[in-house]
Amino acid sequence: MNISIFGLGYVGSVSSACFSLMGHNVIGVDNKEHKNVSINSGQAPIFESGLDELLSKSIESNRLSATSDVKYAVENSDISIICVGTPSKPNGSVDISYIINVCTQIAEVLVQKKSYHVIVIRSTIPPGTIENSLIPHIEKISGLKVRKDFGIGMNPEFLREGTAIDDFFDPQRIVIGAIDQLSYKKISEIYEGNKNYNVKAELFNVPIKNAEMCKYVDNSFHAMKVVFGNEVGVISKNLGIDSRELMEIFCKDRKLNLSPYYFRPGFSFGGSCLPKDLKGLNFIAKDMNLEVPLLNSVINSNKIHTNRALEIIVKTNKTKIAFLGLSFKDNTDDIRENPIINIINELLKSQKYDLSIHDPIVDLQGIFSSKKIKIITNLTESIKENEVFVLSNNSSFYNTWLSNIDKILIDLNKTLPSSFDSISLV
């Protein structure tokens, strides 16, 4: 394919070399002429181990060149990949002015171009940027229409400095969010290389906002892991524990610790272990006068999330509410520290609510002291008596039964199938 890559910094230089080695014809574009001179001489404008060698091979094969001529680059390519910077502003917001400038330049050339051209954003941008800002801007400048005259998509990069070439050719996944199927097809095809240089990874065709969000989620989690490790480390040191050895043991658990198990957005955490042990670790740190802001914030964040659920229930403006599933998770009768109990107790403080509860396993007698709460013995009868049904845990016990009712369903743990008309917390 014929590809133009805008921005020959870290991501742009690596992408230019790697895509051209895969067999594509690549034109690098940068307004800083020294970068173009560097690329054309087979020298990387930034330091990355092994990049000079790859650039030299690409230049020698006549599949890579660099220029400041935007018109030439766009007219001689099918896809334009934007890799310019999106730095932080003083208030923490993202500066997308470099992206806007490049889109303006490309749009001005597209006016004269007859073929369908696809613009791909590799830079990290806030969710909604492409649909709310870039598309209207390109359409205004060019007079063209997206999906009809040009395509656009998001293809975030996951390149680490120092291992960028290996990360490019051996990624864990390739994420593409495209405005239409033709754009997705063209973007996905850039990863089809030759026998010597190829990229084999699972492709994810996702909504554009999802693709825009990916990098933020990745890097925020990585930052949180560093802070978590350091907070555990400082507590461990003060207890005379080898923190490196401790975290090595921690990482051996790939069933829970390093796994997708807890990464399922839903309701607040509860149960006998997580709240108790988190409070215990925070007390240990406090007792040694150690500040561990991340660990300290977790309980409060959980409470805030629980309050969000309470707000959703209150905003229905209904008074007859049934709570289904009182245990903190499926297949257990444990209700200890379950946030749904706190929500029910909060509602019981008001005189206006008529509340009822049901659980297929839990013994519900004596959980609440109030006589205002009713234990459901007949689910079918409860349909007539209640206006809202709140499912708080991940039990599938109620799925078949709830599919036949025409009442407000609040699914706090996103357990119900997507075909259900339900209100979710996340």
Image: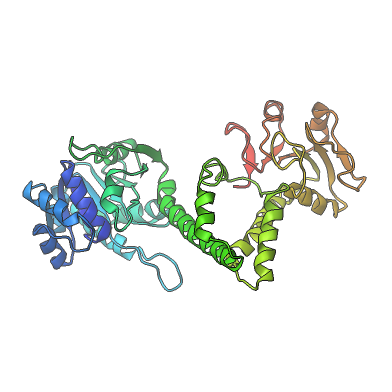
Please identify the quarter of the rendering in which residue 87 is found.
bottom left
Q: Is residue 274 above or below residue 31?
A: above
| Image quadrant occupied by the N terminus | top left
Q: At which x and y percent is residue 136? A: 35, 54
Q: Is residue 41 above or below residue 172?
A: below
Residue 107 shown left or right of residue 67 in the figure: right
Residue 76 or 169: which is nearer the viewer? Answer: 169
Q: Is residue 144 visible?
A: no
Q: At which x and y percent is residue 145? A: 30, 46
The residue depicted at 30 percent of the width and 43 percent of the height is 170
Q: Is residue 163 above or below residue 388?
A: below
Please identify the quarter of the rendering in which residue 176 is found.
top left
Residue, far right:
371
Residue 109 shown left or right of residue 206 in the figure: left
Q: Is residue 123 above or below residue 384?
A: below
Residue 422 shown left or right of residue 362 in the figure: left
Residue 349 or 157: which is nearer the viewer? Answer: 157
Q: Is residue 283 visible?
A: yes
The residue depicted at 18 percent of the width and 63 percent of the height is 45
Residue 225 shown left or right of residue 189 in the figure: right
The residue depicted at 28 percent of the width and 60 percent of the height is 84
Q: At which x and y percent is residue 167? A: 31, 48
Number of marks in the rendered image: 0
Residue 184 or 232: which is nearer the viewer? Answer: 232
Q: At which x and y percent is residue 147? A: 31, 41
Colour scheme shown: rainbow
